[in-house]
Image (cartoon, grey):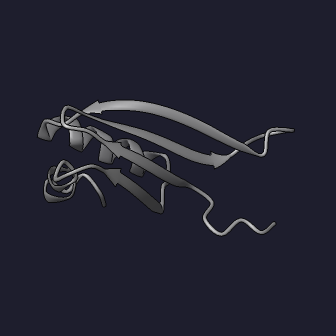
Amino acid sequence: MEVLVDRCAGLDVHKKTVVACVRSPGSGRQKRHSEVRTFGTFEHQLVELREWLIGCGVTAVAMEATGVYWKPVVRHGALF
């Protein structure tokens, strides 16, 4: 199977937290590496999330949120 996106992330947005999982190329026998981190939803914490995603080289993000909780993540520029 051909890899279409080399480094991607999934975000699960809640009222007080954003759980982020970054998938990137693994080494050796491990084909993919996953790292999960939890961030708060205050602006400075969303900026930390953005910096972490950029630092990991993420080029695509999928986001899941119930209700309107996704709006601050996008509004405060936490996503590229």
Task: Determine whether, in the image, residue 65 is placed left or right of residue 29.
Answer: left
Residue 61 percent location from the top left of the image: 43, 58
Q: Tell me how many marks there are.
A: 0
Residue depicted at 16% across the width and 53% down the height: 68
Residue nearest the observer in this picture, 2 or 47: 2
Q: Is residue 38 left or right of residue 32?
A: left
Residue furthest to the front in view is 67
Where 18 sits versus 79, above or below?
above
Left or right, 61 with respect to 6, comes to left
Residue at the (42%, 31%) spot, across then down:
37
Q: Is 11 left or right of 42, judged from the image as shown?
A: right
Q: Which quadrant, please, contains the N terminus?
A: bottom right
Please say if 1 is above or below 14.
below
Q: Nearer the viewer, residue 14 or 59?
A: 14
Quadrant of the rendering where the C terminus is positioned: bottom left
> Does 64 sit above or below residue 17?
below
Q: Residue at x 48, y 62 (%)?
A: 59
Q: Residue furthest right?
A: 29
Where residue 66 appears, as percent x and y from the top left, is 26, 49
Residue 72: x and y in percent read 14, 51
Q: Position of residue 70 (x, y in %)?
A: 22, 52
Q: Residue at x 63, y 60 (%)?
A: 6
